[in-house]
Amino acid sequence: MRDVAIIGIGKTAFGALVDRDLRSLGAVAVKEAIADAQIATSAVEAFYLGNFAGPSFVGQNHLAPYVATAAGLKGVPCTRIENACASGGSAFFHAWLSVASGAYDTVVAGGVEKMTSQATPRVTEILSAAGDMATEGAAGATFPALFAMIARRHMYEYGTTREQLAAVAVKNHANGAMNPLAHMRKVITLDQALAGRPVSDPLTVYDCSLVSDGAAAVVLVPLSQAHRYTSRGVQILGVSQASDNVALEEKPDITTMPALRQAARQCYEMAGVRPVDIELAEVHDCFTIAEIVATEDLGFVNKGDGGPFVAAGCSAIGGRIPVNTSGGLKSKGHPVGATGVGQICDLVIQLRGDAGPRQVARHRIGLAQNLGGSGATCVVTILGVS
Amino acid sequence: MNTSLPDGVVYTETVVRTPPEKYVEEAPYQIAIVDLPGAGRKTVRILGEYVTIGESVSFDSYRDDVPCYRRSADTKISQISNK
């Protein structure tokens, strides 16, 4: 396998973008990534697109060539990848694989979702299909309900509190308020977060990520070629994708995510680093409890200590390991298929030192973690600059 | 396939207040994952009073292939009152 570098990133704002359709969103991100990489569009040899539910949200299938052609790509293999909320991360993983393997030299990984053209009950129904529809969906479990059940059990086993969940939202909103591309650039207080409208007990609306439109893309080349295009290349030190059961009822312990732990273990091994070496992370906070579980399963803290970790400010900008300096899915927004690639873009922004007021002091090694469903797919990536 | 299920213990639960399209009329409602001795875990709908982790629940009925449970004490009371 060859070492691979990211030489260009492109990202639309995330939000309710009423005047943008799925195709133009995706095209904008891809074109921006190609321009940032300073390569010719004709140099791109393959395109992988993460998208969760274009057919349900906007009634369109065959999305990879649909987006690629709008971005000016011609004739190259274009493939859509669907792995629920980890669709973007999975597209990134497969793009990496295609370059690392030697199959291609220049590949674009993108992600896109257009969600806000549907009303909330319909969005809720579409998202619930990331779980097991025959059991969870039939019983009336929504996506927030699955994570609410994870939260309840985590609270029961480890004493995690409502205040600790809310601390994730407060932190991520504070970070997102400094991100010009974030969906909800609004600082919130702990009291506000605790008094949010109940969605699925114990989760309130402030525990849930946003329903957003948006797209993101990155350009990958072999590390040995990166210097030809840019002095600002970022190396992919490690990347791993792992899987697990879709239904929560099929897991022995829902407070931990085996796919996350497996992807993390493989990624740390590939990168030759330990959790203590990670200087910042973008983790998949689709719900506040998901960030708490992720910080535990990534090995930043011991199992059960994720709540105190965030509540003590250890994952704030300036803390031991800043987590979700972009605002996370909570504040930045969660256009499902774009999220995994967007996390990579946000890490690259930090590693390049371009994050402005939210820039962290140490930014040589960063980790991204993208989760699908309630844990059935996980992609973990470690990026580094020398 | 829709035979009666054994009594179980609540492993986790939530009350859904923002429902999917098809259950809009029913919200709020409680769902739970219950541990069933010898029959694994099942995602079920809770009928009647809300339950919490560790409580015993008894099988009530199937509704469209979804197993419905209720708090065990409830079941006993209803059985007594039916006599």
Image (cartoon, rainbow, N blue to C red):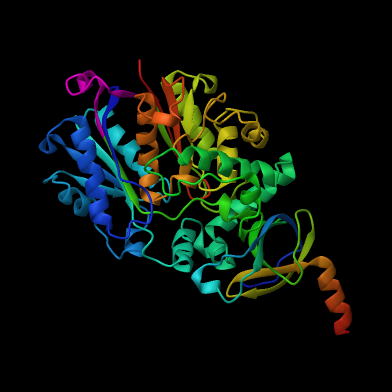
Q: In the orientation shown, which residue stands out farthest toward the top?
A: A386
Q: Residue at x 43, y 26 (%)?
A: A366
Q: Nearer the viewer, residue A254 or A125?
A: A125
Task: Give the image location of residue A32, x and y in percent.
Answer: 22, 39
User: Disc count in the image?
Assistant: 0
The magenta stretch spans residue A225: yes
Q: Residue at x 58, y 50 (%)?
A: A207
Q: Is residue A84 visible?
A: yes
Q: Nearer the viewer, residue A230 or A273?
A: A230
The magenta stretch spans residue B48: no
Q: Residue at x 16, y 37 (%)?
A: A45
Q: Nearer the viewer, residue A250 or A90?
A: A90
Task: Give the image location of residue A102, x and y in percent.
Answer: 22, 27
Examine the image and state in which quarter residue A19 appears. Answer: bottom left
Task: Give the image location of residue A209, x and y in percent.
Answer: 50, 50
Chain part drawn in magenta = A219-236
